[in-house]
Amino acid sequence: MLSPDRVVRRALELGWLPSACAVSPGLQVVSIRARNQSYRLSVQGGASLFAKLGYDADRAATVAREAALYRLLLQARTDVPLAPFRGYDPVLHLLGVGWVEGRTLEDALRRGGPRAGAGRALGRALVALHQVPPSAAAEALGVNNPGSAPWILSSHRPSLSRVQDVSPAQAQGLALLQKYSAFEELLDRLCRSWSPEALIHNDLRSSNILLARGCPTLIDWELGGPGDPRWDMGSVIGEVLTTWVRALPLSPEGGLDELLARPRHRIQRFHPFLRAFVEGYAGGLPRDADRRGWLDAVVGFAAARMILLVLEHATLAPLLPASSYYLLQLALNLSRQPREAAHSFLGLSGFP
């Protein structure tokens, strides 16, 4: 690992920070908890830098991948909202981007839900991203892989190595996936339909979407590459539903129907955001795009995203929390009647 001082010196050498920062007493370096070694470098009254270091072989590869995608998106002159790209040092495996002020989508959801304008802008951002062909992404990344399906679509058939590494709560979750055939049918259907026809972000968790004055910025591109655009769309919807369920004050004594009757707990308060999000995306699709069954598939991928989040949330837990059971049941309900769920539950009536 590099020391914070070494990161600052290298950022100065590369011109990612103004040279005056070298002698500025106001230069602050804050370590950020993430899967990579990351820092925020800031000067009082000046711009801030986000520096990410891949400190072992696996992390170095993902940081290099992220840098390659920044370059691709800038060269393609897309309308994808990105953090300002400062550069990449392939020797130290150090990525530099401008720090973006804003709150995460997760925070906005917990505070009552982002406005429709933010949803529309996010939909337009994703349709701009998905205009980049998978061949361009594969070339930029130097890979021949056309874009494999995410692991969650085969999670009901885990490998021996994956089973050995799961927590007790994850084991509970996997057992539920294997117990009910509807989970197997959903995941197998999505895996068969996986179509890597565009560049996708592939990790649109709510913490990777920053909002400032209604404008989104997409960050953390380490998993990006060729993939199915419907996975990105479903991921956003799945994140909204997961945040909603986890914020509910669930208790064994209280009835769910009574709880959901309270205005602050109703899913309807997210309808304007969700509808604008899908409208923004659909409005940017080519006129000749085949939209038959598109919304059904997006809802299915939203269900898969919720399952993924249940298993991720259980990484260090001894038991699945009550919210996880509700999320798995909701995922099943979405997968069984995706069109009805989209129209009546998600507020997406009128879409094909």
Image (tube, grey):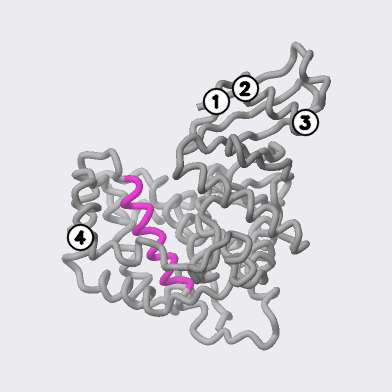
> In the figure, residue 21 lies in which quadrant?
top right
Of badges 4 and 3, the one in the foreground is 3
Q: Which residue corresponds to mark 3?
A: 47
Whole-percent x, y for residue 119 in the image: 64, 59
| Viewer-nearest residue: 33 or 346 | 33
User: What amino acid type is highlighted by mark number 4?
Assistant: Leu
Q: Residues within 10 Å of mark 1 (few under 14, many from 20)?
A: few
Residue positioned 23% across, 59% down in the render: 159
Callouts 1 and 4 close, C-beta under 8 Å: no
Mark 4 or mark 3: name the one nearer the start of the chain. Answer: 3
Mark 2 surroundings within 10 Å by alpha-carbon count, few (fewer than 14), some (14 through 19), many (20 or more): few
- Mark 2–mark 1 CB contact (< 8 Å): yes
Q: Is label 2 or label 4 in front?
A: 2
Which three-letter amino acid code belongs to the residue tagged 3?
Ala
Q: Earlier in the sequence, mark 1 or mark 4?
A: 1
Badge number at residue 6: 2
- Inspect the magenta stretch and tell me whether residue 311 lies in it: yes
Q: CA distance from mark 2 to mark 3?
A: 20 Å
Q: Left or right? Give the position of 189 relative to 40.
A: left
Q: Which residue is mark 4?
A: 176
Instruction: State the residue at coordinates (61%, 72%).
Output: 135
Mark 2 vs mark 4: which is more N-terminal?
2
- The image quadrant of residue 178 is bottom left
Disc 2 element: helix
* Amino acid at dot 1: Leu
Write the start and end of the magenta stretch as one range: 298-313
Q: Quadrant of the C terminus?
A: bottom right
